[in-house]
Image: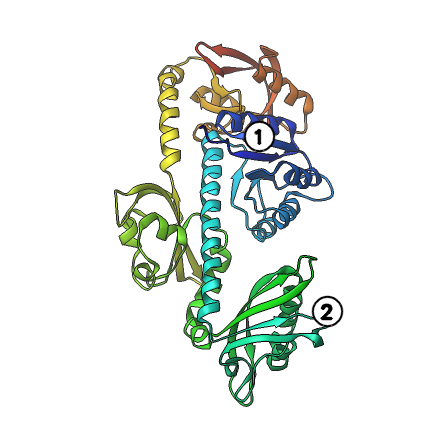
Amino acid sequence: MKAPAYRILLVEDEPIIAAGIATKLKQLGYELAGQAASGENAVRLAESTEPDLVLMDISLEGRIDGIEAAGRIRTKRDVPVIFLTAYADETTVARATSHDPFGYVVKPITDRELYGAIEVSRHRYELDREIRQREERYRMLTEVLSDYAFGLTIGEDPADDRCEWSVGSPAILLGHGSEGVSGLGDLLKVCHPDDATRLRAYLQELRSLGSGRLEFRTLIEAEQPRWIKIDARTVKERAGNVAHLYAACQDVTDLRQAEATLEEREIELGRIVQTMQQGIWVGDADGVCIYVNEAVVEMTGYTRDELVGERSLPTLIDADTAKPDHPFETGLNSRHGPPRPVLVTPRVVVEDGRLRGSFYLITDLSQQNARYRRSERQRNMLDAAFRALPVSGALVDVSSNTIVRATESFAVATGRDATKLDGSGLFALVDYRDLDQLNLVVAIASGRLSRAEVALRTGEGETRRFLVESRSIPDEPGLILLTVEAV
């Protein structure tokens, strides 16, 4: 039986761009679950169509932009979101990151970039779901192995809470001599003043949300503050009212103290690490690993204990070929099996001229490389002949209006950098504010018009007039040859 297609909700308010992306998605084998041009419609469609993934333009017109729409969707549905953006300032990126996006794609979009972003996000989402399931099993285990656990009957008034049972030592939570928790209000009595607001909000949420975890400090007699981790779950009656609460408590003071140095390092790198999506390896200034995520463990078969605390990067990749801030492709070593092809993006963190640490983002290229090689074999058959053309021309993918190849004379005529034309959007050559000229290019690219005089914008920002003509390519219905001649 054929597996169902991966269903994607596309949110883009530019009709031309939306049409191009929709065509790409279908050609790549995905199913379009729906299209929306505003944040409000995106939220409604996400509820009604239940997509597997959302492609969300950050800059949407209307009452809510793409970032806010993504936040509303994530609160209602557990679905990955990839942001589409032409550019993003630091403030916008910070807002977007707060909604835990599964990726970013910069417009104009190539087939390879779109396919890679979707498949990486798809893999990460499945991995995250597996991790959440493991965490759920872990929480159940802590209830058995906790230092102190209790069950309460929850009353409508907190004063009516009543203890059903308790096991372990209540001294870790309430101090020596205590007989145990009689109600949730007992926790507030021993809570450190600086954590009281958080604990009060947590207890209030437990009465309605069902479950949650919190770490807070307690002040017991004259002792130093102790760190307590509490995992709690509420059980509702059939009528929907909360009736019972079960909680497990652990004294994690020693663990918090041991992690203090590591936490300071992670705070310094926190903003960067939170934006990572695939495999992540983070090292200190001496090259010692201080953090790896679950993706690295899954891809390599090495455990965290084998990687963290060691100079483990050379175990995973050929780090001698790395250049600071320059992505490179290499093989990721595995405990079992041959190396897998990956794209490694290194970054260094320097503060006041001093190296503070480094991190490496590792993206699996196995699927992307296979698809890219197939595509390259098809394109290379045309490449040699095309480069030798005497005319100023560009080979254009009509499904996405992307320039696949451009002759040197085309780059010179349009005042563009020849190395940057391949893979760029055709409409970037036109001043977007001049809709008449934009419509002419659209008509030529779509085949409705074979030639026209068009004003194109050069790389220096000047506007020049050209006679633009499109020609079909034999046996390649998805491509056209676009030639330009200065008028």
Q: Secondary structure at mark 2?
A: loop
How far is the residue under mark 1 from the one under mark 2? 47 Å
Quadrant for residue 469, please give it.
top right
Q: What amino acid type is highlighted by mark number 1?
A: Leu
Up-down relation of residue 254 to residue 99 (above or below): below
- Residue at 46% of width from left, 67% of height from top? 142
Q: Quadrant of the N terminus?
A: top left
Up-down relation of residue 411 to residue 365 (above or below): above
Q: Is residue 95 visible?
A: yes
Q: Is residue 285 left or right of residue 461?
A: left
Return the disc, 1 or 2, that comes first in the chain's sequence.
Answer: 1
Where residue 449 appears, x then y in whole percent?
A: 61, 11
Where residue 467 appears, x then y in whole percent?
A: 57, 13
Q: Which residue is mark 1?
A: 32
- Residue at 65% of width from left, 20% of height from top? 439
Q: Is residue 155 left or right of residue 107?
A: right
Where residue 121 appears, x then y in whole percent?
A: 48, 42
Q: Which residue is mark 2?
A: 156
Q: Is residue 86 visible?
A: no
Up-down relation of residue 54 to residue 162 (above or below): above
How many marks can you see? 2
Where residue 51 appears, x then y in whole percent?
A: 58, 37
Q: Quadrant of the C terminus?
A: top right
- Residue at 57% of width from left, 49% of height from top? 93
